[in-house]
Image (spheres, grey):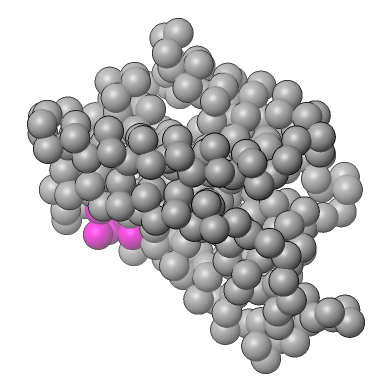
């Protein structure tokens, strides 16, 4: 249980600092740290990530940083796509899911090493306002892609949402972080609903993991403005690479763990 609390706190800290990223560690933490089967780890991870993201979102709501119309489009399409991802998940061997998950982690880590510097786009024009003709299809595409991966792998998708919001849609980093947290809450709820009947959830582990994650996210939020975001992203990227390699090795060497 000590390992569960420690891993939960780490995930919450990453959510509080980066507005995402911690969710990609939740499934490996629950499978290899808490000893849950993959079928139980996926809905548990979604439950933990959804509640923790909601806690991290609260102070950003007060600051008025969420771009609500974009969040509604990306979150709404993502929620629908999460059910499709969950359906595909049930058709695949758990080992293939874990190896695919590791590949996704490696991709996310590579993307984080590249940074997510602010840039203009259809959804945040330099002079203000939104060009919905260009923003709407991009928002729908981003929502469908992230939502499908949420259902398939049991991740909130913040590590994919933030680059999409900044680089594809053109939001500023603070707005992207806040909007990402709201979308993670929506996607996690949909993914949890899609996976809820797959396996029994150990609510004792889920509660401990969630409380630790919430505490970590709220503590991290107090320090986030003082820390260099790019350096944090780079450190997290290398952590993701290491965990991705561990997941692949475990999936191949210990197939019964999946």
| Residue 122 drawn above or below residue 118 | below
Tell me the magenta residue range: 85-89
- Identify the residue shown where x is 58% and y is 61%: 163
- Across and down, in percent, residue 206 comes to 45, 23
- Across and down, in percent, residue 10 comes to 54, 25
Does the magenta segment cover residue 142? no
Lateral position of residue 38 relative to residue 239, left or right:
left
Lateral position of residue 187 relative to residue 148, left or right:
right
- Across and down, in percent, residue 25 comes to 43, 36
Numbered disc total? 0
Q: Residue furthest top?
A: 2
Residue 90 shows in the view: yes
- Identify the residue shown where x is 87% and y is 45%: 62
Q: Residue furthest bottom?
A: 133
Residue 39 shows in the view: no
- Identify the residue shown where x is 52% and y is 39%: 236
Q: Quadrant of residue 149 in the image? A: bottom left
| Residue 128 drawn above or below residue 116 | below
- Across and down, in percent, residue 56 comes to 70, 37
Lateral position of residue 127 relative to residue 57, left or right:
right
In which quadrant of the rendered image does the C terminus lie? Answer: top left
Q: Nearer the viewer, residue 220 or 179?
A: 220
In which quadrant of the rendered image does the N terminus lie? Answer: top left
SS assignment for the magenta stretch, majority: helix
Lateral position of residue 122 relative to residue 197, left or right:
right
Q: Quadrant of residue 212 in the image? A: top right
Q: Quadrant of residue 253 in the image? A: top left
- Identify the residue shown where x is 73% and y is 51%: 178
| Residue 15 drawn above or below residue 174 | above
């Amino acid at each position: 249980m000590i390992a569960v609390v420690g891993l939960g706190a780490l995930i919450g800290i990453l959510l509080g600092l980066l507005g995402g990223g911690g969710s990609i560690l939740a499934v490996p933490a629950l499978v290899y740290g808490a000893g849950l089967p993959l079928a139980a780890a996926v809905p548990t991870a979604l439950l933990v990530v959804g509640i923790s993201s909601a806690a991290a979102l609260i102070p950003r709501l007060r600051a008025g940083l969420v771009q609500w119309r974009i969040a509604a489009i990306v979150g709404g399409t993502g929620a629908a796509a999460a059910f499709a991802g969950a359906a595909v998940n049930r058709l695949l061997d758990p080992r293939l899911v874990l190896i695919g998950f590791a590949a996704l982690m490696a991709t996310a880590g590579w993307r984080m090493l590249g940074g997510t510097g602010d840039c203009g786009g259809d959804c945040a024009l330099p002079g203000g306002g939104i060009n919905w003709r260009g923003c709407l299809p991009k928002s729908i595409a981003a929502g469908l892609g992230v939502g499908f991966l949420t259902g398939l792998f049991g991740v909130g998708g913040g590590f994919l949402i933030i680059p999409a919001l900044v680089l594809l849609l053109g939001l500023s980093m603070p707005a992207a972080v806040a909007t990402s947290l709201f979308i993670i809450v929506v996607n996690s709820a949909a993914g949890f609903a899609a996976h809820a009947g797959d396996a029994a959830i150990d609510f004792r582990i889920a509660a401990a993991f969630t409380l630790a994650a919430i505490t970590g996210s709220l503590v991290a939020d107090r320090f986030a403005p003082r820390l260099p975001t790019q350096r944090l992203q780079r450190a997290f990227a290398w952590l993701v690479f290491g965990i991705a390699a561990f997941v692949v090795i475990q999936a191949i060497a210990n197939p019964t763990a999946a």
